[in-house]
Image (cartoon, grey):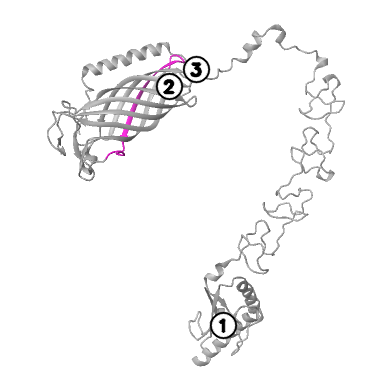
């Protein structure tokens, strides 16, 4: 659409400009840095607004009038409630190029609107400045309807479900403002603000064609005169004024030097052997601090005045023994002074680890784990090892199926874990190299797998949890042309499942 810029005719434009210039001139001539202590403000005024952003109607800028109520949140922030009323007239001289329902784009039409807004505004310069810049954000409701100027009948359009609907709404908008204010005194200020409201469509129920073509941007410039009121605390006077105006008997009396007590310890300076005693310290007859426990913190300032002699050199600024790891055992008695915070300790300040898994009690989520079982950093069994097969490269002599001592220790640790996690099952697969016949190798691999199963049974693992397979000379993991490769192929693979 085409937005006109004649501002409703030369008469309206000239009148508004003259009014604004005259008001600004008077206020600027009288402006001073007044206090801003009043809590509330009430203002009213007018300005110019226009509705644009659509592809159908063509509205001229029109005058608007309104008032505001404000509450000062702080020296720089204010919350405003706003009311304004205005109406727009459609340009009937435009070419008839489109329609919305029964409405042609050059129909005589009035857009009547009431604006209810709430804005949080901020002064961008020092609050005491007589002239200041402002910015704000907010939102509100625009109550509007499109009517026939002659009959005042509200036009009808199609609703979201193609039903007849009034071309009117109570619509939610969001707004941003910017402007400046002039405050000649504490009670009066003028604010000139530019504003942009975006109509969100919330609260409307029109067909998509209507919703996409109608105007959604409300632009305006308003000038409002505010009166500030409401009691608040009086700011303190210049401190020296009270001293000059005080009655003679209330003025400070300067003591003779012999009676002065510079450190306030009750001992006159003339008899005080320690003139710079900290305030609050207990002193002896000669004005020197008393330190009953000899920890360097005088009584009266010492929160722990009976510290042991061994604690000297290990106290904080309050005279209490330092406990760096917060375990309840002070550093001078703590044989393990840097424990992780939260660990339970013994009388010597060293961590207690009931299940000997390396995670101290107090930080151990599983404090009764079986001894020797691998755990995670929380002290619980690390079940990640069950996510992939375990390979046992047993050092078999040719034709043997016995488990070597090194592998037995590893299988013992596995058995301990399996006895703790009883829902895990096993598939034990035996493999050989390619030396020998396939039948002999398959029988040998089965004997080797059975031997591992039997050993696990001796360690307490239930035989029903295990399946045994002799795979023979299959699934090679290395070349059989070297002794090293053949040793890798002679193996047991244990697959875990539930």
Measuring from the top left, give residue 35's x and y in whole percent: 50, 17
Up/down of 162 relative to 35, above or below: below
Which of discs 3 and 2 lies nearer the camera? The answer is 3
Q: Is residue 232 visible?
A: yes
Quarter of the image with the N terminus is top left
Q: In x, y percent, where is residue 116?
A: 34, 29
Distance of label 2 from label 1 (alpha carbons)? 87 Å
Asked if the residue at tag 2 contacts the one at tag 3, i.e. Cβ–Cβ closer than 8 Å, the answer is no
Q: Which residues are magenta?
A: 183-204
Q: Which residue is mark 1?
A: 487
Dots 2, 1 in contact, CB < 8 A? no
Q: Position of residue 5 (x, y in %)?
A: 22, 25
Identify residue for label 2.
132
Question: Which residue is at 83% across, 28% downward?
Answer: 283
Task: Classify residue 322 as left or right of residue 215.
Answer: right
Outermost residue to the left: 96
Q: Nearer the viewer, mark 2 or mark 1?
A: 2
Q: Where, by quadrant of the figure, is residue 132 drawn? A: top left
Instruction: Name the residue carrying label 3.
Output: 35
Upstream in sequence: badge 3 or badge 2: 3
Checking the image for residue 33, the label placed there is none
Query: Horizontally, is 430 left or right of 43 in the view?
Result: right
């Amino acid at each position: 659409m085409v937005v006109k810029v004649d501002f409703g005719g030369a008469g309206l434009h000239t009148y508004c400009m003259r009014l604004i210039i005259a008001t600004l001139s008077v206020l600027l001539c009288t402006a001073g840095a007044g206090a801003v202590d009043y809590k509330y403000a009430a203002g009213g005024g007018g300005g110019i607004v226009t509705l644009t952003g659509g592809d159908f109607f063509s509205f001229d800028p029109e005058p608007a009038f309104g008032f505001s109520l404000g509450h000062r949140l702080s020296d720089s922030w204010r919350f405003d409630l706003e009311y304004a009323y205005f109406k727009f007239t459609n340009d009937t001289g435009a070419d008839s190029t489109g329609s919305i329902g029964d409405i042609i784009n050059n129909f005589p039409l009035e857009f009547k609107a009431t604006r209810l807004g709430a804005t949080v505004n901020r002064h961008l310069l020092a609050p005491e400045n007589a002239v200041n810049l402002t910015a704000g954000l907010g939102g509100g409701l625009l109550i509007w309807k499109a009517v026939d100027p002659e009959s005042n009948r509200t036009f009808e359009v199609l609703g979201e479900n193609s039903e007849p609907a009034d071309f009117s709404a109570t619509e939610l908008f969001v707004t941003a403002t910017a402007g400046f204010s002039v405050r000649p005194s504490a009670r009066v200020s003028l604010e000139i603000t530019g504003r942009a409201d975006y109509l969100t469509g919330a609260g409307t129920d029109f067909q998509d064609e209507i919703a996409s073509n109608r105007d959604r941007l409300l632009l305006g410039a308003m000038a409002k005169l505010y009166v500030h009121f409401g009691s608040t605390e009086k700011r303190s006077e210049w401190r020296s004024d009270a001293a000059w105006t005080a009655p003679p008997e209330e003025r400070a009396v300067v003591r003779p030097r012999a009676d002065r007590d510079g450190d306030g310890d009750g001992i006159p300076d003339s008899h005080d052997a320690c003139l710079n005693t900290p305030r609050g310290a207990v002193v002896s007859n000669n004005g020197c601090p008393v330190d009953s426990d000899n920890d360097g913190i005088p009584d009266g300032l010492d929160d722990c005045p009976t510290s042991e002699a061994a604690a000297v050199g290990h106290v904080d600024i309050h005279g209490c023994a330092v406990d760096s790891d917060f375990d309840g055992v002070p550093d001078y008695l703590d044989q393990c002074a840097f424990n992780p915070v939260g660990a339970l300790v013994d009388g010597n300040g060293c961590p207690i680890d009931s299940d000997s898994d390396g995670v101290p009690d107090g930080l151990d989520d599983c404090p009764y784990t079986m001894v020797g079982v691998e755990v995670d950093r929380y002290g619980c069994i690390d079940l990640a090892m069950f996510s992939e097969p375990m390979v046992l490269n047993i050092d078999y002599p040719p034709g043997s199926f016995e488990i070597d001592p090194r592998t037995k220790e590893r299988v013992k640790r596995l058995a301990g874990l399996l006895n703790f996690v009883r829902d895990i099952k096993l598939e034990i697969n035996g493999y050989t190299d390619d030396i020998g016949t396939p039948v002999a190798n398959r029988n040998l691999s089965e004997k080797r797998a059975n031997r591992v199963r039997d050993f696990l049974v001796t360690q307490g693992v239930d035989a029903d949890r295990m399946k045994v397979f002799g795979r023979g000379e299959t699934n090679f993991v290395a070349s059989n042309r070297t002794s090293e490769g053949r040793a890798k192929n002679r193996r047991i693979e244990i697959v875990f499942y539930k």
